[in-house]
């Protein structure tokens, strides 16, 4: 574990694996706004592409660049943990190796962390693969900054009810800036290693000693779309990572019947809408295996299986939707998007 350096206020921690085609652009977006009190830590999970050469070519532009290359692939959970372990800043900002940092983001965060909260949750902007189209992606129903202590049950209830998706539960690393000493004092749950959400579990483990989350309703990053590395084992498994992963987290910390677990399921439905699940059903039918189809159906029934007329109608729609019409809808949508 690297000791904290009093001269470094912020460490931008970037885990990467075979993102040589993108990480240069990511680092360029950071280099344009670096300050002497900011370092960049890149943990390379044993990439087999040109990632080392790309990072090395930017050393002159990023003096405070720390690059560590693993000898073998460790997975995103271990790479994120190693990035923070290697960092020397008072605060760490987890950042994706294919996203872009918004102009002015570093100066904005350096000013905000003076408040001394445990974690800062910022917004991101969802983009197309080439960043030509963009749409805002708010994470809480807030228009002005607000601080929540998640150790307080009433404040936690407000926070969970205001959540619009899983980002408030720390699903997207690019939205998280946290105190390094609080991370170090927390612990990793080994059972969540390999889930892709070990970092979220480690943050939630801070709650008993107080976890002050300062919500910043401002986008500080551009998230590249169409480049989900978690789809390497198929779309059905990617959906499983999201739904089962956060169901397990909610159950682990709060219990399956808790208010918090119900709000997490609501936020999962906001991300895995009927439209998204029908699209997944079509793709899995065309590209997946019989086991993939069963897995996707099971995940949908579980997520939408609660009482309520609206949820019942969604279940019927999912079960009965003819694949022919789904395919026709996708074809027409693609046609009008490119015409």
Image (cartoon, rainbow, N blue to C red):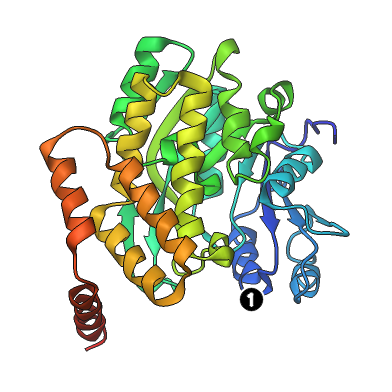
Give how far across and how far down residue 265 sits, in percent: 34, 36
Where residue 52 sits, quadrant-wise, is: bottom right
| Residue sitting at x 69%, y 54% | 15
- Residue 221 seen by the camera: no
Q: Compare residues 15 and 328 and report the one nearer the observer.
A: 328
Give how far across and how far down residue 118 sits, in percent: 57, 24
Tag 1: Cα neighbours inside 10 Å, few (<14), some, or many (≥20)?
some
Against 130, residue 211 (above or below) is above
Q: Secondary structure at mark 1?
A: helix
Against 39, residue 158 (above or below) is above
- Residue 97 seen by the camera: yes
Q: Farthest right residue?
A: 71
Q: Farthest left residue?
A: 309
Against 48, residue 315 (above or below) is above
Q: Compare residues 12 and 105 and report the one nearer the observer.
A: 12
Give how far across and how far down residue 178 sits, in percent: 60, 32
Q: Compare residues 259 and 157 and report the one nearer the observer.
A: 259
Q: Report whether 186 appears left or right of 214.
A: right
Q: Quadrant of the N terminus?
A: top right
Q: Quadrant of the C terminus?
A: bottom left
Q: Compare residues 224 and 112 and report the one nearer the observer.
A: 224
Q: Which residue is mark 1?
A: 21
| Residue sitting at x 64%, y 53% | 34
Give how far across and how far down residue 312 sits, in percent: 16, 43
Q: How many marks?
A: 1
| Residue sitting at x 56%, y 59% | 230
| Residue sitting at x 55%, y 25% | 204
Q: Farthest bottom residue?
A: 339
Against 242, residue 322 (above or below) is below
């Amino acid at each position: 574990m690297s000791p904290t350096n009093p001269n470094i206020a912020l460490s931008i921690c970037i885990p990467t694996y075979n993102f040589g085609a993108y990480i240069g652009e990511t680092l360029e977006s950071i280099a344009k706004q670096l300050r002497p009190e900011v370092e960049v830590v890149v943990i390379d999970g044993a990439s087999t592409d040109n990632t080392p050469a790309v990072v090395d070519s930017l050393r002159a532009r990023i003096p405070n660049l720390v690059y560590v290359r693993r000898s073998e692939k460790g997975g995103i959970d271990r790479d994120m943990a190693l990035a923070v372990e290697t960092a020397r800043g008072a605060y760490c900002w987890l950042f994706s190796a294919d996203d872009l940092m918004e102009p002015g983001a570093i100066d904005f965060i350096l000013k905000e962390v003076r408040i001394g909260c445990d974690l800062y949750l910022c917004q991101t902007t969802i983009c197309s693969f080439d960043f030509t189209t963009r749409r805002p992606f708010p994470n809480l129903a807030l228009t002005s900054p607000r601080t929540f202590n998640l150790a307080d049950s009433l404040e936690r209830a407000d926070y969970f009810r205001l959540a619009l998706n899983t980002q408030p539960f720390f699903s997207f690393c690019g939205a998280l800036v946290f105190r390094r000493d609080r991370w170090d004092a927390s612990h990793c749950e080994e059972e969540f290693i390999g889930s892709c959400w070990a970092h979220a579990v480690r943050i939630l483990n801070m709650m008993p000693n107080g976890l002050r989350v300062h919500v910043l309703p401002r986008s500080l990053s551009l998230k590249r779309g169409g480049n989900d590395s978690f789809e390497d084992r198929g779309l059905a498994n990617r959906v499983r990572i999201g739904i089962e992963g956060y169901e397990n987290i909610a159950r682990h910390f709060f219990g399956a019947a808790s208010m918090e677990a119900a709000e997490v399921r609501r936020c999962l439905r906001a991300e895995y809408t009927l439209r998204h699940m029908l699209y997944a059903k079509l793709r899995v039918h065309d590209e997946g295996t019989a086991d993939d189809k069963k897995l996707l159906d099971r995940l949908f029934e579980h997520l939408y299986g609660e009482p309520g007329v609206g949820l019942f109608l969604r279940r019927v729609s999912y079960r009965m939707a003819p694949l022919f019409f789904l395919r026709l809808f996708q074809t027409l949508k693609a046609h009008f998007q490119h015409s």
